Image (cartoon, rainbow, N blue to C red):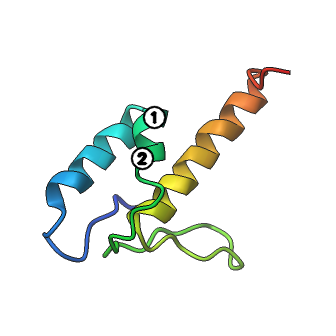
């Protein structure tokens, strides 16, 4: 079960809300900009696999969502090959 991620501190609240809008609209370009973010998350995301570590920063969760989007495109035959 996935929960909406939250930041541990309010320091980067604006940046985080912008990230959530990009996530919800599948905006790949903005998600890519957040890959290097090390802003910590307060919410633990259940990965559904005991071997998978939960993302704990905006950058790690952006990586997770980009992976999901890319896998969805490959499954739909949009891999460009």
Residue 8 lies left or right of residue 55; in this view the side is: left
Q: Residues within 10 Å of mark 1 (few under 14, many from 20)?
A: few
Q: Which residue is mark 2?
A: 33
- Nearest the viewer among 35 and 69 is 35
Disc 2 vs disc 1: Cβ atoms closer than 8 Å? yes
Vertical placement of 1 versus 55: above or below? above
Q: Residue at x 70, y 39 (%)?
A: 71
Image coordinates of residue 2 in percent, x first then y, are 46, 60
Residue 79 has which mark?
A: none
Q: Secondary structure at mark 2?
A: helix
Vertical placement of 31 versus 54: above or below? above
- Residue farthest along the right direction in this orientation: 81
Residue 29 has which mark?
A: 1
Q: Residues within 10 Å of mark 2 (few under 14, many from 20)?
A: few
Residue 70 lies left or right of residue 5; in this view the side is: right
Image coordinates of residue 53 in percent, x first then y, are 60, 77
């Amino acid at each position: 079960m996935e929960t909406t991620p939250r930041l541990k501190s309010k320091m980067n609240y604006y940046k985080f809300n912008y990230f959530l809008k990009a996530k919800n609209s599948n905006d790949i370009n903005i998600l890519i900009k957040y890959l290097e973010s090390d802003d910590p998350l307060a919410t633990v995301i259940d990965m559904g696999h005991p071997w998978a570590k939960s993302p704990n920063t905006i950058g790690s969760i952006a990586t997770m969502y980009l992976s999901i989007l890319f896998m969805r495109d490959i499954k739909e035959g949009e891999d460009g090959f």
